[in-house]
Amino acid sequence: MLNHTQYLHKDSDAWVTFVHGAGGSSSVWYKQVREFKKHFNVLLLDLRGHGDSKASIKNAFNDIYTFDAITDDILEVIDYLKIEKSHFIGISLGTILIRNLAEKHPHRVESMVLGGAIMKLGFQSQVLMRLGTIFKSIVPYLWLYKFFAFVIMPHSNHRESRLLFVREAKKLYQNEFVRWFRLTSEINPLLRLFRTADIKIPTLYVMGGEDYLFLPSVKKIVQKHSLCSLVTVEHCGHVVNVEQPQIFNQLVIGYVSDFNS
């Protein structure tokens, strides 16, 4: 089972589950935990092979990771903790996992907050993925990860986010990075489904105004799908919860609280 930490609230019945991105860990939410646990029950987890969720014996010889399998990892934790329904908050690739969980188990999802949401890979993103595919088994993965982090978060005010993700990525092994990178082979059909299917679950997109790779596609989705809204945080890049934590916390706590008022 994934490594996880829960903070129980003495009065609230509402659960908030945080899902980090590829190469990160639950530590990327360190600017959220203190505030969120004042209002809700909080669940943090480390995805497969990340943080303190070391690869299990059953996965040690399994080179093929799928979005469904990793989504099932999350479901296993909330089943174990007997959480019937939760609000899910994700960042970057974590938003894909949350959206996939909502697609397959909509009755378990109260609402979704998708920060730095990845809903389409544009031309530049496709080029990045192609380069990664070519060099993933040749170049040390940390070099690739640093390059990707700089392309996605290029500005000086994105530096803290870049350093945080690179620091966490150092805890991965080369084989683990390659397994996760192979997920890109199934990402385009999945994102196409997400853009097409309106699952009618309340969704708040929180995007940085400087998240030039992923913001345009989110703007289009919000125009087409019901129960969706978008907040764009100016002078902010991909990892909104790290770069602008006060704005992120205020927005999201207010959004989730409205469901329990």
Image (cartoon, rainbow, N blue to C red):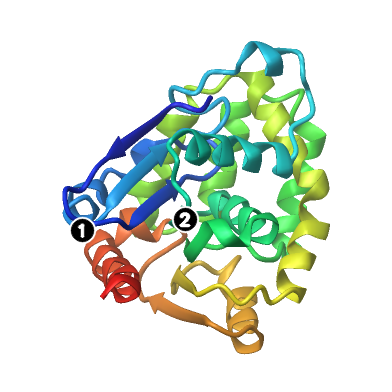
The residue type indicated by label 1 comes to: His
Task: Return the x and y of residue 154 as percentages of the image width and height.
Answer: 48, 56
Count of numbered circles in the view: 2
Q: Is residue 69 visible?
A: yes
Residue shown at 79%/66% (left/top)? 192
Q: Secondary structure at mark 2?
A: loop
Which residue was labeled with disc 1?
39
User: Which residue extends farthest bottom?
Assistant: 223
Residue shown at 20%/58% (left/top)? 39
Q: Residues within 10 Å of mark 1 (few under 14, many from 20)?
A: many
Which residue was labeled with disc 2?
85
* Picture quadrant where residue 36 is located: bottom left
Task: Return the x and y of residue 171 as percentages of the image width and height.
Answer: 47, 22
* Picture quadrant where residue 3 is located: top left
Whether 19 is drawn above or below 193: the answer is above
The residue type indicated by label 2 comes to: Lys
Q: CA distance from mark 1 to mark 2?
A: 16 Å
Residue shown at 76%/52% (left/top)? 187
From the viewer's perspective, is the residue at label 1 or at label 2 nearer? 2
Q: Is residue 140 visible?
A: no
Whether 139 is drawn above or below 186: the answer is above
Q: Secondary structure at mark 1?
A: loop
Q: Is residue 6 left or right of residue 98?
A: left
Which image quarter is the C terminus in? bottom left
Q: Earlier in the sequence, mark 1 or mark 2?
A: 1
The residue closer to the viewer here, 113 or 142, is: 113
The residue closer to the viewer here, 56 or 72, is: 72
Q: Residues within 10 Å of mark 2 (few under 14, many from 20)?
A: some
Residue shown at 63%/43% (left/top)? 71
